[in-house]
Amino acid sequence: MPDLLGMDLGGTKLDFLLAAEDGTFLYEKQYDSPFQKTGKILGKGNSEVLVDTILTHIPEEQRVAAYIDQTEDRFLKEAKKEIGSFGIAGKGASLCGKTWEQEGNIVIAGGNTPMRFASGQNKDKPGIVVMKAKADHPVKAANDGTAAATAQGIYYKVTHGIDPETTAYFILGTGFGCGIPGCDVPAEIGHIPVGFMPKALWQTCGCTAGHPTACAENYASGRGISNCAKILLSLKSPFLKNISPCFGRHAGFSDLSELAADSRISRHAEIDAKTVMDYAKSNADGLAVFIADLAAQVTADAAIAIAQLFGLTRIGIGESVARLNPWHVDNIAKKVADRTRNSNMLVPPLKVELTPIHNPAKYGALSLVVPESQYEIWAKKMAASLHKDLPAGS
């Protein structure tokens, strides 16, 4: 039986996975991403990344593709040593950024992909070449959200008879993103501006250099939840009171300054998303409840907007913030239902839920090249992994 090769390129890691067409994982290994930061700063304020330190004998625009190619060869040699011979029928690549094909190359551009490695061949649409098509490895590539959505879409099709292209997968973890099966252009919901957000809560964002933004990711993601808490706790009481009316329709409170003054979040040396969400879950801290509710509203607004644009009927939400806080997903779903009740545009009603499969990212790249004849087997395997890998207490 032919085997499938999956590659998942992120900002910090580069995963390769070899699987049989029936969904059996044969060999997998993780390597450093070419974009892994070293902690040093280069000229013009650029952060040094791994490929700044290696392959320096070749031009910058060729280094990322060369590193990925060399790492793939290394993986395949290690796999052959561990499991013996295999034959690759197709390769799926899940990539961290907008993804397209340009002159026979797979090209990306994104917030974690330094543009100094971009090819200068197309001045109107510069991008970083990450791989070339190989005759022995037919390649299908997609943005990481789209790849994960493809895996989830297989499950929805098999178990619910839903057209995958009417579904979406929301990444709700360190970042905030979205993918839709079969959609060539990734829906960058993380960078939809939040119009009601006061400027004091704007944050720096990878999409825009030089000034902060009101991007949805800055409030819905784990990073955004953490930063919101830190910003609100740093602002003076009179200012917090003045900006409170901006949020009147998003949470049941009247004065942010009172919530901040009484908050227990500030007692923690490390104010992270887990701290905020744990307090919010138990309703033990008013400021935490406000921040979580704000994150839910921003996510719900994005879900409604994307559903209206693409004709979606179902959205599954995954990654760490969602999986560790299913109550938060329920709150998002409630806000979506409240805002779209009796809608003439979303028929049937939009359903939002915790993704029915665990770790779609692991299956995403492979799902791009899974034969349709194997969908039912893959759906069962993805559902089985949900129950096996759920964290304690989730």
Image: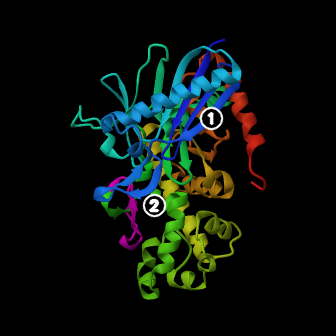
What secondary structure is found at the residue carrying circle 2? helix
Q: Is residue 103 above or below residue 311?
A: above
Q: How many marks?
A: 2
Q: Marks 1 and 2, Cα distance to the nearest angstrom?
A: 32 Å
Q: Nearer the viewer, residue 230 or 25?
A: 25
**Residue 29 - label:** 1
Q: Nearer the viewer, residue 73 or 240?
A: 73
Residue at (30% x, 36% y) in the render: 59
Q: Is residue 153 left or right of residue 212?
A: right
Region in magenta: 193-208
Determine which residue is flagged by label 2.
218
Residue furthest front in the image: 57
* Residue 85 in view: yes
Residue 254, position in %: x, y?
52, 80
User: Badge 1: how crowded within 10 Å, few (<14), some, or many (20+)?
Assistant: few
Residue furthest top in the image: 1
Q: Nearer the viewer, residue 187 or 39?
A: 39
Q: Is residue 202 magenta?
A: yes
Mark 1 residue type: Lys
What secondary structure is found at the residue carrying circle 1? strand
Residue at (51% x, 73% y) in the render: 230
Residue furthest left in the image: 123
Q: Is residue 330 magenta?
A: no
Answer yes or no: do the residues labelled 1 and 2 have beta carbons within 8 Å? Answer: no
Residue 265, position in %: x, y?
61, 76
Q: Is residue 209 left or right of residue 92?
A: left
* Residue 297 in view: no
**Residue 263 - label:** none
Mark 2 residue type: Asn
Q: If you read the primary sequence from the N terminus, does the residue marked by circle 1 or circle 2 appear first?
A: 1
